[in-house]
Amino acid sequence: MEAVIYICHGSRVEQAKHESMQLLRRVKDQVDAPIQKGCFLELQEPNISDAVAKVVEQGATKIVVMPILLLTAGHAKRDIPKLIEQEHHKYPEVEFVYGKAIEVDDRMVDVLAERIDELPLQNLEHFEMLLVGRGSSDPDILTDMEQLANMLQERYPNSSLEVCFLAAAKPKFEQLLQAKVNQSSSVIVIPYLLFTGLLDRGIKEYIASLNLGNDQQVLRTDYLGHHPNVVDVLVDRTKEAMEGAADRAEMAEGSS
């Protein structure tokens, strides 16, 4: 029997847990798997070990593990695979299949553009834009964020757009935004974050702390949340992993 375990990052903010569970409910409704379970990488319960034990108890013999992460960096490349390996040692009779993160996708750029268009402004060209990522020491994250920024820039060719990060990468959000404010620029801050949490709150608080000129504005778009496009991409990634697992099983049976 096949099961899908969705593993979210986790947050100290309870609202983030509710938002992630709400997103997973919408994804589960579109995924044809008899057993589906959500869990968290850190900071919240249940963890992946709890989730695996639960689905095995329900009869799962194949588990597709889906990282509910925007991009592929340390968590997706190292932390989650290590946890899967530990669970495989506990349950050697169970097949584990690891899916992909959301990664770069036109549909996610559509969400960013929609969030910008939701803002109460008339002259977008008067604003500079900052696409804000979580940040990572992994160079792939920098490449992916630049690619997303270039795709978003194509939607707004008359506006300036730069990438910055909240942690572990440069340029840092606070420093770049302060530099823009010092230049008397008005800025749109675009968080590339799935849910609310301490990072999103930090963005809001920093913007609120700025001393702006009379004609300056710093506006912040909403985070991605459970936008229909986010749901669609996650459903596709899950189905891709499930179909890949089925293809490998058919190949193995054909060669035996």
Image (cartoon, grey):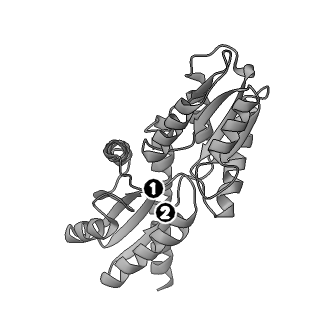
Q: Characterize the local packing of mark 2: few (<14), some (14-19) or many (20 or more) Cα atoms within 10 angstroms.
A: many
Residue at 31% from the left image edge and 82% from the top image edge: 90
The residue lying at 75 percent from left, 21 percent from top is 125
Q: Residue at x 67, y 28 (%)?
A: 187
Measure the alpha-carbon separation of dots 1 and 2.
7 Å
Sequence-first tag of 1 and 2: 2
Q: Is residue 3 left or right of residue 155?
A: left
Residue 80 position (above or below residue 175) = below
Dividing the picture into quarters, in which one does residue 34 lie?
Answer: bottom left
Which residue type carries mark 1?
Thr
Q: Which mark is residue 226?
A: none
Q: Residue 179 at what x, y percent from top left?
A: 72, 37
Q: Residue at x 67, y 61 (%)?
A: 140
The residue that label 2 is drawn on is 99
Q: Badge 1 local density, few (<14 within 10 Å), some, or many (20+)?
A: many
> Against 82, is 160 above or below?
above
Q: Is residue 195 above or below residue 60?
A: above
